[in-house]
Image: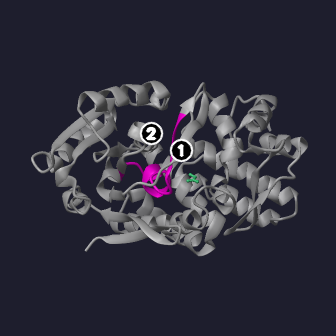
Amino acid sequence: MAQRLSVLYEKKPCYDIVFERSFDGLWEELAKFDADKRRLCIVTDSTVDSLYGGEVLGCLEGKCLKAVKYVFPAGEEHKTLDTVRELYGFLIREGFDRRDMLLALGGGVAGDLTGYAAATYLRGIDFVQLPTTLLSQTDSSIGGKTGVDFDGYKNMVGAFKMPRLVYLNLSTLKSLEDRQFFSGFAEVMKHGIIKDAGFYEWLLEQMYEICERDLDVLEEMLVRSCGIKKLVVEKDPTEQGDRALLNLGHTIGHAIEKAKNFTLSHGECVALGTVAAAYISWKKEMLSMEEYYEIRDMFVPFNLPISVEDIDPGEILRLTKSDKKMEAGSVKFILLKKLGKAVIDRSVTDEEILAAIDEIHFSDEDAHE
Ligand code: GLY
């Protein structure tokens, strides 16, 4: 029997996260939502389509009213309203109505974009998440955040829309390039750092098996990591409070991501942003120096950066302050009281932000020291 977690919304069961190792069990899960009486559209990008598009379509064909696939070009630059607009057109031409359902197959881009289309097409239709990257399996497929980037601003336009199901085929993690795998791992570490020091220590103990992508260990890792995310989003589904803790490392991280023109992966930027946040926490005497260095150095064995070249600190500060995490003129930072306990802080000054950027900025002078 596959492991599963039930995610509550307003204290009632809303959707399950199912941990599988193939797509063989997918139809049985979809059948619980009368999928045989519905049209189903798989939405995926060109990379994931070539790996799993045919297989997933094969699981649906002949079992439902109609099974179709909409493929958009891979890449964050396609997470836009233009792609959503084209998807709306496709759904209209294929005769999709309010009873029909979308299946987001892929990473965060496919999940966020499909979820947003599902939230808005005909004022809302059902959708299912079939995440195939570590980032989407541990983070973006859970909790109902959907949306697209707008004019270079990440996730600027979106909606909360809960999926009907999150179906994880863990075997898909084997097909990820190392860089993409470790990018997702940054979000797994984040869950330990903000909420569960025991889980964080366990991750470090399992370092070898995780890097080898041992499926038993990855399954336990994801059940625990998704379990943390589930508790956070159940308590605060629309980010009025504690859900913001999940943004650890994202404040300065998003700024670096944008300044570097998306040449660094999201997880790499989250790792850098987390080092910066931990540094600010140390300087504000919330963390000890030993705790700061422990958090910083543990990204290294998982191929995640703790410093970055060629950034303009002034630009990173400006971008940090233009992020949507600004509230009433102050940046909403997530800082650390200790490993496993994150807090929201609105008192971080420009000087503290600049000092943290300096800490993660690898300059020519560092190289010559
Ligand atoms: N990825 C952050 C959140 O779901 O709130």
Residue 142, percent from left and from top: 47, 57
Between 62 and 212, the residue placed more toward the observer is 62
Q: Which residue is label 1 attached to?
A: 159
Residue 157, percent from left and from top: 57, 36
In reply to whether residue 363 is colored magenta, the answer given is no
Label 2 lies in ligand 1 vicinity (Cβ under 8 Å): no
Residue 191 falls left or right of residue 366: left
| Residue type of the residue flagged with mark 2 | Thr
Q: What residue sits 85% from the left and 43% below the top? A: 355
Q: What residue sits 36% from the left and 70% below the top? A: 4
- SS class, disc 1: strand
Residue 151, percent from left and from top: 60, 24
Q: Which residues are magenta?
A: 128-148
Between 196 and 159, the residue placed more toward the observer is 159
Using the image, tell me which numbered label, if any, was put on residue 314. none
Q: Which residue is label 2 attached to?
A: 120
User: Is residue 306 in view from this perspective?
Assistant: no
Residue 338 falls left or right of residue 246: right
| Residue type of the residue flagged with mark 1 | Ala
Q: What residue sits 18% from the left and 45% below the top? A: 55
User: Is residue 1 in view from this perspective?
Assistant: yes
Tell me whether circle 2 and circle 1 mark residues in contact (CB < 8 Å): yes
- SS class, disc 2: helix
- Number of numbered callouts drawn: 2
